[in-house]
Image: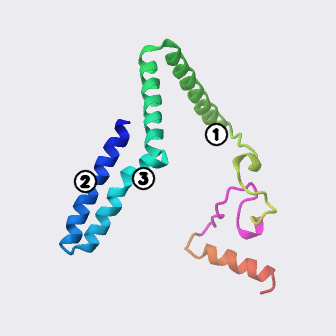
Amino acid sequence: MLTATVCIALSGAGLAIAFLHAYRRRFLRAVRLTAWSLLPVGLYMSGVLPLGQDVGEAVGDWAVDLVFDSTVWVGMAVLAVSAVLFVVARVAGDRRGDTPPAAERGAAPVGAGTTPAAGLRPGGGGKPKKSSRDDGLSDFREIEEILRRRGI
């Protein structure tokens, strides 16, 4: 109830100021102030402000539990161990050369637009091959080769 009163009061004050600007023939400023003045009532009537209040209360309750509840501390420790294990597995996999298949990495399969003829690695790496002599024209050579293969 207090939220509704505050929103109505803010909108009323803003509309009064907008009316004064319109009276002084500052119509553009009056329209902008009217738009800003209608926001508090609109947010309250659409339910966004009560939703924000509920989210704020939920975050506050969680923060209080984080400080005073040992179960939340243990949960945070479990999440930290999980994150560390993900990082360790990633680093160990990179060192061993174990790379997941292209489908797991999210790369497109070889037949779906990325072909080795287009200068891409067959593994789906997505990076163009580097020539032994990188003079800035390697991309043009690859394009020229593709055009030659297609008879263009």
Q: Distance between the residues labelled 3 and 2?
A: 15 Å
- The image shows a total of numbered marks equal to 3
Is 104 within the magenta?
no
Residue type, mark 3 in image? Gly
Residue 25, image x, y percentages: 21, 75
Q: How crowded is mark 1: few (under 14 residues within 10 Å), some or many (20 or more)?
A: few
Q: Residue at x 68, y 36 (%)?
A: 96
Residue type, mark 1 in image? Asp
- When the figure is inspected, residue 21 is found, relative to residue 92, above or below; the finding is below
Q: Which residue is drawn at 44% across and 30% down?
A: 57
- What are the residue bounds of the magenta stretch? 116-133
Check residue 94 in the rendering and tell me which mark sits there, or answer none.
1
Q: Residues within 10 Å of mark 2 (few under 14, many from 20)?
A: few
Q: Which residue is under mark 2?
A: 13
Which residue, as the protein is rendered here, is positioned at the far bottom? 152
Q: Which of marks 2 and 1 is nearer the N terminus?
A: 2
Which residue, as the protein is rendered here, is positioned at the far top? 70
Choose top left, top right, bottom left or bottom right for residue 75: top right
Q: Which residue is under mark 3?
A: 42
Q: 7 and 70: which one is in front?
A: 7
The mark closer to the camera, 2 or 1, is 2
Residue type, mark 2 in image? Ala
Residue 124, image x, y percentages: 72, 56
Check if mark 2's residue and mark 1's residue have beta carbons within 8 Å.
no
Q: Distance between the residues labelled 1 and 3?
A: 53 Å
